[in-house]
Image (spheres, rainbow, N blue to C red):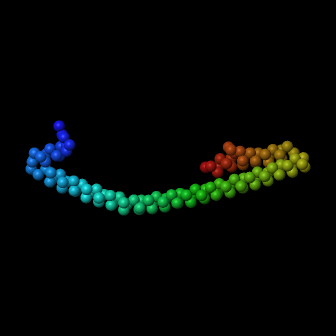
Amino acid sequence: RRGRRGRRGRRGRRGEGGGAMEDGAKRQRKADAGRDNSRKRKKETPDELEKRVNALESENLQLRLQLKVGKETVQRDAQEKSEITVQLDEMIQRQASDSELQTVLETYVKKFSDYGAVRTDSIR
C-alpha cells in the first residue's frame, strides 16, 4: 500500500540515502526550467503574432484588390451586355439580315456564356 504520500514518501521514511534531498533539487531544477521555457514562449509569442498579423493584412489587401477587380469586371460586363442588347434592338428595328443578327449573337455568346471563349481564357 502506498498510503497518502505515494512512493516518494515511503522512500523518505526508510532513509535511503538522502533521496528526499535529491527529489527536492530535481523538483527545483524542473521548476526553473519550466519558468525559463515559459519566459521564452511569452517572448516568442508576440513576434510570431506580429508575423501572422502582417501575413493576414497582406492577404486581406490582396483579396480586397481581387474583389474590387471582380466588381469592376461585373460592372463592365453589364455595360457591354446593355450595349449589345441596344445594338440588337436597333438591328431588329431596321430589319437587319439574319446573318448580321447571328454574328452579333455569336459574339455575345462567346463573350458572356459560362463556357464562352472569353470567359474560359480569363479563368486561365
The furthest residue to the right:
94
Q: Relative to the observer, which residue lies in front, 117 or 23?
A: 23
Q: Relative to the observer, which residue lies in front, 64 or 113?
A: 64
The percent position of residue 39, horizontal first and vertical second, equals 33, 61
The percent position of residue 48, horizontal first and vertical second, equals 42, 59
Q: Residue at the location (72% across, 55% down)?
A: 76
Q: How many marks?
A: 0
Q: Residue at the location (83% across, 49% down)?
A: 88
Q: Residue at the location (85% across, 49% down)?
A: 89
Q: Relative to the observer, which residue lies in front, 19 or 4?
A: 4
Compared across the picture, whether 72 is left or right of 102 comes to left
One can see residue 28 in this view: yes
Task: Give the quarter of the image for residue 5.
Answer: top left
The furthest residue to the front:
4
The percent position of residue 120, horizontal first and vertical second, equals 65, 47
The percent position of residue 109, horizontal first and vertical second, equals 74, 45
Q: Relative to the observer, which residue lies in front, 13 or 110?
A: 13
Q: Residue at the location (28% across, 56% down)?
A: 34
Compared across the picture, whether 25 is left or right of 124 comes to left
One can see residue 96 in this view: no
Compared across the picture, whether 48 is left or right of 81 comes to left
The N terminus: image quadrant = top left
